[in-house]
Image: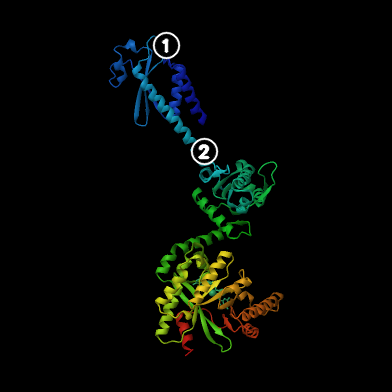
Amino acid sequence: MAAFDVLQYMQTLESMLRITEQTWLLDEDFLKVLDKLSKVLGITKTEIDIKNKDDEESEILTLYDDKSEAEGLAGYEFVYGKRPVRVLIYTKCGNSEYPAELSAGLNTVYEILRRQTIRELNRRDEEARGKTDFVTGVSTKKLFTEYVDQLYKKDKIFEYGACGFSLKGMAELNRQVGNDNGNKLMASFVSGLQTLLGDDGLVARTGGINFSMIFKKNRFDEIVVYLSGKVVYLNDDSEGKLMSACVGFYPISDTCTSAAELNEIITSALHNALKNPLQPFIIYDEKLQQADNDEKYIAGIFQDALDREEFMVYYQPKAELNKYCLNGAEALCRWFHDDKMVLPYRFIPVLENNGEIIKLDYYMIEHVCRDLRRWLDEGRPVVTVSVNLSRCHLGDPGLLGHIIEIVDRYKVPHSLIEIELTETTTEVGFNELKALVGGLRDHGFSTSVDDFGVGFSSMSLLHEIPWHVIKIDRSFIPVGDGSAEDEKKNVMLRSIIEMVNSLGLKSIAEGVETIDQVILLKETGCYYVQGYYFDKPMPVGDFETRLDQLK
Ligand code: C2E
Ligand code: MG
Ligand code: MG
């Protein structure tokens, strides 16, 4: 029943009460309205046989001595919740006056009906609110879930595709037009999409600038065009704004069996799409889903694996080209899980994503210090060992203190530890990097820029931050295939080395695999290398044999 029915009945009832206020004459029509309203509100109204004197329950009858006096009266019991309210109502015109004692009962019923009407209207309002997003006018996630549930129940889900999308450039748009107008533009964009879909699907706001959508498969092309860019207007005179979205499409497969699962997959599809903002659309296929599942699996077992010390330090020697001897090593992490060795590319990005990498990095520093301490105690020759530190920790104010605490706990000279950090993209990151590198230097640690050249290197990175070592990424090392690309690398490599040398920094080339590369590097003025030509990363036992050769 529509919401206005409740209100209409209540209003009719009130006007009837007002008209009859003086006489308290309530006729059959009043009773009909009362009936309907009670029904809608879930209040039971039962007629009491007030003429049956033997009915002990009917207290109202105590007012009357004989049947005739009860003529023209009807007795009702209203039950809402646990509380029954009894009331006498005149149903016929008669001479008798309405008994004053009973008006209180009628008022109580009226009050209950009035309060229940307000409650019912509020409830319906809230329900509507729960299904419509007030900012944009499209559906909420709740309605979306119900809608998808229905498609599953009717076995129609496979006629549909789904996607999660996020509006692009909203921060900039809000800056230009203000938040309120930004919301209006967002509303116009997404409600336009719902209009385009009509009954062929549903758009729902899932939070902020993120949305979910389900649509008939044959509407796919139109949706792609719309989400790629649509001009929307604040009003008739305003300048149009081009809006678009980053989208993760999911072709619904039979592995997804419920609305709840679909919601999760849509979230992951959008998450994947947002990883690469330059590519506006992705299809979240089985391969990507598998990668996500792996990610969840790794994140789920990481802490246990760390507690069980499944992570091992592998050491990759660094060579000095003048003397052709071991000059240092990089500590690289290897995970031994289920009798298999897992390489960093499988788990480091996952841990960087969920912030757990800090635990692994401290673990690596600790294990390297433990090895160094043992080597020193055993009287072995030692070299400086570099440890990778993820950029994620840069904002952590306790970082430097924590590193010092670990190294000092093992009484390892700071000069034996080098910290490798990658370049940074943001200004905040730059300042934090500068502070950390400066702090490490002040405490006697060595520092290096890892993978130099592939990130957002700038002159200020080299000039303003007090590094010791620049590790030139292997993508700059010519492979010697005579290609134009290789020649370009050659030119760049020479200029990088020249610049690094003239700044008084130490350069080391990563990923050196051939003797030709070694010769080229030496010629160019880079005297330190790390790469498979000399050694692959190796377990601690093998590395100890290398150290012993220094004796
Ligand atoms: P990276 O710090 O640049 O480490 C060098 C990577 O290049 C290592 O890969 C190493 O095995 C590989 N490599 C060395 N020489 C050669 C070569 O001649 N040819 C080729 N093709 N590759 C070579 P790995 O061990 O798989 O590590 C990959 C990345 O994972 C590392 O790059 C580093 O960024 C990260 N990583 C490894 N361990 C840790 C760790 O404990 N903490 C953090 N935050 N990152 C780590
Ligand atoms: Mg490194
Ligand atoms: Mg590197």
Q: Is residue 239 above or below residue 21?
A: below
Task: Please name the residue shown 72% across and 75% down the image.
Answer: 484
Residue 364, label in figure: none
**Residue flagged by tag 1: what amino acid is it?**
Cys
Please name the residue that numbered disc 2 is placed on: 128
Residue 479 visible? The answer is no
Quarter of the picture for ligand 1? bottom right
Q: Is residue 23 left or right of residue 421?
A: left
What x and y, as percent, mark residue 270?
A: 56, 55
What x and y, as percent, mark residue 491?
A: 69, 78
In terms of sequence position, does the residue under pointer 1 or pointer 2 come before the other? 1
Residue 93, label in figure: 1
Closer-to-camera residue (519/403): 403
Q: Is residue 61 left or right of residue 19?
A: left
Q: Is residue 478 above or below residue 139?
A: below
Q: Quadrant of residue 276?
A: bottom right
**Other-residue count near label 2 (Cα within 10 Å), few / some / many at <14 / 14–19 / ≥20:** some
**Residue flagged by tag 2: what amino acid is it?**
Ala
Q: Residue furthest top?
A: 95
Secondary structure, mark 1, is loop
Task: Please name the residue shown 51% across and 69% down the image.
Answer: 390
